[in-house]
Amino acid sequence: MNTYAKFMREAKSMAGNEIHRAKIKKAITSYEIQVDGMKKQQFQDWNAAREVAAGIKNEVLANLPEMLQEFEEKLTSRGATVLWAENAEQARHYIEEIISRHNARKVVKSKSMTTEEIELNEYLESRGIENWESDLGELIVQLADEKPYHIVTPAMHKSKQEIARLFVEKLGIEYTENAEELTMAARAHLRRAFVTADIGITGANFIIAEEGAIVMTENEGNGRLGMACPKVHIAIAGIEKMLPRLADLSLFLPLLTTSGTGQQLTGYNSIVRGPKSAAEPDGPEEMIVILLDNGRSNIYAQDHFREVLRCIRCGACLNACPVFRSVGGHTYATTYQGPVGSIITPQLRGMAAWQHLAHACSLCGACTEVCPVGIDLHPLLLETRWQADKEHAASKKWQFAIKMWSKIIPSRKVIDTFRPLMKIFLPLAKPFLSANQKKRIPTMAKKSFAQMWENNESTR
Amino acid sequence: MSNHVNESKTISLFIPCLVDQILPEIGFAMADVLRKLHYDVTYDARQTCCGQPAFNAGHRTEAMSVAKQFLATFSNADCIVSPSGSCSAMVRNYYPVLFAGDEKMMAQVHSVQERTFEFSEFISAENKVERIVGHADVSLSIHNSCHSMRELGIDEQIADILARIEGVKLFVPQVEHTCCGFGGLFSYKMPDIASAMAKSRLEAFTGADLDVLIVNDPGCIQHLRAEAPSAGFKGEILHLVEFLQKAMD
Ligand code: SF4
């Protein structure tokens, strides 16, 4: 089944799934209350903050090649290694090479969408490497043998009861719905992984040009443990994660957490500038940062789309999106879900197979309204549709229908000729349509407004 | 963007294709209300559609030919007023995208753009809200269309207008605004998602036992009327101008 047919099938089943709708509604309602409050508490002028953030990110995009170089120079000067991966395969190859060089058997991973993007879990599994997700949400989806549901809250779709049953089955604990007890069970399980892992793999929320540092922000501290305990730390980051200066974090950390979870700041924020130095008693002996392109320079090269690289992966646009709320994260079948995912996936993974995502949008603009770095998300979805049209990747059926329509609609005379036909045709089409299609087939008015106006008639 | 208007002008009705072919009563209601507010109203039947269906589906070449026809029709109009926030936003916010780089067309776009308004914002910008007098003993609520709200920045205008009608009990839902799921061709391409969205949206109103839900975009109206029975919404779904037409009688 192709990606489009699969999306439509999943969307249909999820859209009718009331249990899912209720769970997501509950999660997002409490998220919204939290975020609205935090915006007011933390920012005197949220819109001004967004503008400043967008400006800093534009500065990055204007100087990205230079900043990447500066980042590499600074970081390597402190003994770390920087590797450039053009695509997912190359990134996995680097990781495999490091793993075999160290004869590693066990890896502990922090939450990272970039590792999802290169399908690292599947890859490590296929190589027989034991691999533990250290983020609670990620651990839950890993144990359930699922993909993350949402870029920030991977287990958003799981109720406490579902998590409890999962832990009973996979971690062998007694059934409990007490959140603290469940977290402690995961913790006990993970601590073993931290102390015995050979390699820690993390993502990065930001990378800093001026400082040659990577920045990680998280709530559980597991990412920090994961990169500090093992002898080797591999960090993988998309090239767009760049910020010019360390000082920019004073805006970007609160901006990200406010939009992401409605927190003032996450519990743990780590800035890493290299492996353990001679003066330090512990820490990883080796640090490797893999800078991932994987289609990003393709976006970078297109003026119209470049601004989407400002994205800091806060997830706000997913939560705001009524389509995401209706179909859920898994339906997208992409690493990045929701509005931003529907823009970047066709660019990263091919227009023909993924352009349907850009059509799964009512253009309501809720995403654009919430984006903390001011990306014009819904206009970019429109741009994507236009690009699909230009590249002949759009649906042939609809392309044809619109072509016919555009021949008829500009002429009043032609419309008047076609009207009676439409009145007959529309009801006839109904038996061939699904219930949800059928109910929105309109009933044409007896006469058009134009015809009535001309005859001095009125509808009253 | 806020457009400025001068005193006493003739209004050219901007009748969206959906109103023209399916819901003409909305067009007549708007004409009626405008006349009651002492405007001269004209209509040019050369207009057919603004091109939004094609533009939003990504077919810009086709949208352009339709949009050119629209611009030609209204080149000499005084004031262009439409009962749709979405179609007004197409002209105001997206014609510049559609014709970007074409200087000659852009001149036309700018000129028409400046004179195009959605009904409620026009009445407010003209300071004519006070002139609305009417009566209706109903409980109602408002679904402001996304394009009216986010593309044109229309917000309090609708409630201000409704506040002029004596007897109206306005219900304000506790939940944040969400899209009703219409989205033009979206609701035809992805009908199941559109239905789920309508259901979620109408949930905000079903408990309130409303007589009327006021909507200011014909697309949303058509969609919500189709979805109301399965969503369990029992009130009437009316365009703002339809409601005013009756209440101002
Ligand atoms: S596009 Fe904006 S709102 Fe969406 S994840 Fe990125 S930064 Fe957040």
Image (cartoon, coloured by chain):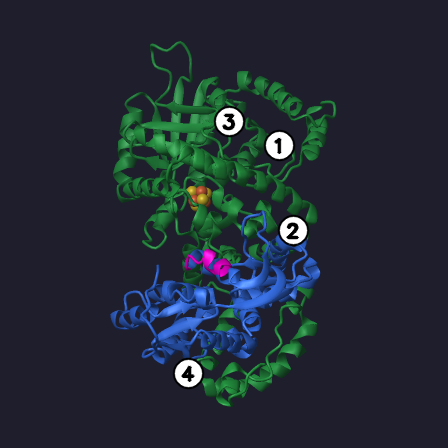
Chain colours: A green, B blue
In the figure, A414 relative to A404: above or below?
A: below
Amino acid at circle 3: Asn
Amino acid carrying label 1: it is Ile
The yes-or-no answer for disc 3 within 8 Å of ligand 1 is: no
C-alpha separation, residue under disc 4 versus residue under disc 2 = 46 Å
| Sequence-earlier tag: 1 or 3 | 1
Question: Which label belongs to residue A14?
Answer: 2
Q: Amino acid at mark 4?
A: Asp
Above or below A413: residue B33: above
Name the residue that disc number 3 marks. A219
Q: Position of residue B96 (x, y in %)?
A: 33, 65
Question: Is residue A179 left or right of A453 when viewed as pictured?
Answer: right
Q: CA distance from mark 1 to mark 3?
A: 16 Å
Report which quarter residue A284 is drawn in.
top left
Closest to the observer: A249 or A143? Answer: A249
Tell us which disc is closer to us: 2 or 3: 3
What stretch of residues is rendered in magenta?
A: B152-160
Q: In terms of secondary structure, where does tag 2 sit? A: helix
**Residue hosting label 1:** A140
